[in-house]
Amino acid sequence: MKDAAIKKLIDAEKKRQKKVVNLIASENYVSQDVLDALGSELTNKYAEGYAGKRYYGGNEVVDKIEMLAIERALKAFGLSADKWHVNVQPLSGSPANLAVYTALVPPGGKIMGMSLDHGGHLTHGHKVSATGKFWVQVPYGVDAKLEQLNYGELREIAMREKPVIIVAGFTAYPRAIDFKKFRDIADAAKNETGQSALLMVDMSHFAGLVAGKEYPSPFEYADIVTTTVHKTLRGPRAAMIFSRLDRHVDGTNGPVSISSKIDKAVFPGLQGGPHINQIAAVAVALKEAAAPAFKKYAKQVKKNATALAGELTKRGWKIISGGTDSHLVLVDTWMNGQKNAKGAGAVSGKEASDKLEKAGIIVNKNAIPFDKRPPTDPSGIRLGSAAETTRGKLEKDFVKLAKKIDSILRG
């Protein structure tokens, strides 16, 4: 690289990544093949539109790339092309979710999504997001005692509010979601015309575990499934939208498929030309995710997260919901400002994150359910096992990590 300043910074970031322990739940390490696709000549091509329907010429090669990415997306999750449609053009997860709402929820319509402080995402209707400015969030959370979803309460909310769309998914909820119960709730929450709520699953965090058969699949029950590619799926920073071909909504001239509405919302509604280099890298990651080795990886991700949560529990730290069914562990480090009998607690999320980073362990501060502390310095930290599992760590390594985390937070 001729640009010495940028090369120096890239080299510095490479060095930083190599020397730290990465427990950021939304990060991972991609293969060299993914990096090669991202840095390829595909960056040069403008491909506004969809395969076979471009607005520019010279797209015969990139059409094949986009179609291959779609084919691999279906294969990675065991789906058939006659039942599911995939849009691989969203630039990232937030634009993907925005596209779904733009397509299917009228302005001012209701989105029922998990509240941010209970583990939901900004784009599930939070007020600081565009999704909370253009639409109305109907929030739901976890049970105060068990810190897990209360499906009876969710049903009551949905029946009362009758949202247009219900979003199942999280950024900081460690437990498996019962998608059948969400489907039943959506079906029961009919509006005045008798149409049930749409069920959208945002599987951004656990997509790799679904592909690896280590987390319940949402596809049997959902109408729409959105996901990023760069978390447990171990791909580039990108997103995909899956939608059922047989699900329709009312249009001005009769029923319209949700798939066609979503495609129009992505382009030309929200985006121009897609990033073909990014789509090629998605295709590479999806091929890797369909390989037998990826299933072993996904299994190890869960084992490692369980080991991490278990050892921290032994040492007196409170694990939100009592454990994990995924790659994610949410830890209450503040514990109401008190240390327990084992000497754990009374460390704010920001202080915990800062202490760990100084010791070379990277996490993020995170709110916990019913948190009384501010978002800038909440009561907990979020840990994830995916990135360090990619680096080859096993349960014994995560037990050692838990011991080190305990020692650092007590210091």
Image (spheres, rainbow, N blue to C red):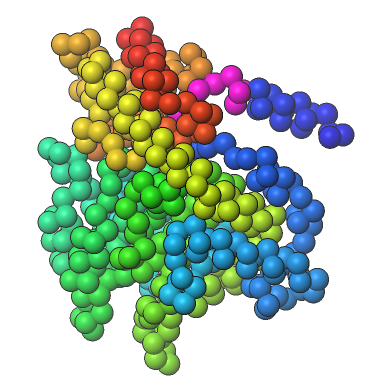
Q: Is 251 left or right of 91, judged from the image as shown? A: left
Write down the quadrant of residue 363 in the picture.
top left
Task: Determine if residue 174 is in view.
Answer: yes
- Res. 95 in view: no
Residue 283 in the image: state x and y as whole percent: 61, 56
Percent x, y for residue 83?
A: 43, 75
Q: Which region shows up in magenta?
A: 16-25
Q: Based on the picture, tell me whether residue 353 belongs to the magenta stretch.
A: no
Is residue 257 shown above or below 405? below
Q: Residue furthest top?
A: 411
| Residue projecting furthest to the right | 2
Task: Please state which of residues 41 and 122 is positioned toward the viewer in this rendering.
Answer: 41
Q: Is residue 404 above or below residue 78?
A: above
**Residue at x 71% of width, y 30% of height:** 10
Q: Residue at x 54, y 21 (%)?
A: 20
Quadrant of the frame with the N terminus: top right
Q: Residue furthest front?
A: 292
Displayed quadrant of residue 19: top right
Task: Name the residue: 36% across, 19% down.
Answer: 399
Q: Quadrant of the C terminus?
A: top left
